[in-house]
Amino acid sequence: MDLESNPSHLARIRRNKRELGSGIHLPSIEYNDESIDPDPNRSYRNYIVEHPKAVLPYIGIIKPIFLSLEKTQKL
């Protein structure tokens, strides 16, 4: 997402801007758990590695602040 990411650029734009897009999230999750008990039937160990995938859509809209400031100053 760009949309004039620096707030100082908002004073430069003269018209509304819209942006659509998506991002891909690819985390790696590792789970490791172990319990040791004197009774061997109650001891356990878990080890899981997951790689979920997610596509994250976004929408962005910016409006020029310069025109809004001019209107406010005229009041």
Image (spheres, rainbow, N blue to C red):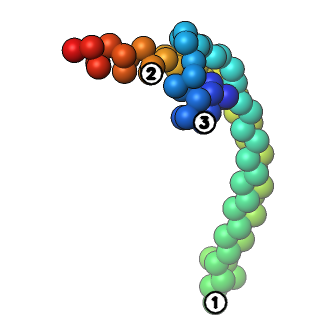
Determine if residue 49 is in view: yes
Q: Is residue 39 left or right of residue 67?
A: right
The residue at which mark 1 appears reads as 38
Above or below: residue 17 compared with residue 48: above
Distance Cα–Cα, label 1 vs label 3: 60 Å
Query: Label 2 sits on what residue type?
Result: Ile
Q: Which residue is mark 2?
A: 65
Q: Where does the image place residue 14, in percent across and percent down from the top left?
A: 55, 12
Q: Amino acid at mark 1?
A: Pro
Of residues 19 and 69, which is closer to you in this image?
69
Is 51 rendered above or below residue 31?
Answer: above
Q: Identify residue type, mark 3.
A: Asn
Q: Which structural element holds mark 2? A: helix
Quarter the N terminus occupies: top right
Query: In x, y percent, where is residue 21?
Result: 69, 20
Q: Quadrant of residue 66?
A: top left
- Residue 44 image-quadrant placement: bottom right
Q: Residues within 10 Å of mark 3 (few under 14, many from 20)?
A: few
Q: How far is the residue under mark 2 from the one under mark 3?
A: 14 Å
Q: Depth check: give the residue in front, 67 or 44.
A: 67
Q: Are marks 2 and 3 in contact (CB under 8 Å)?
A: no
Q: Earlier in the sequence, mark 1 or mark 3?
A: 3
> Which comes before the other along the chain, label 1 or label 2?
1
Distance, label 1 to label 2, CA atoms, is 69 Å
Instruction: Name the spot of residue 73 as percent of width and height, x first.
Output: 29, 19
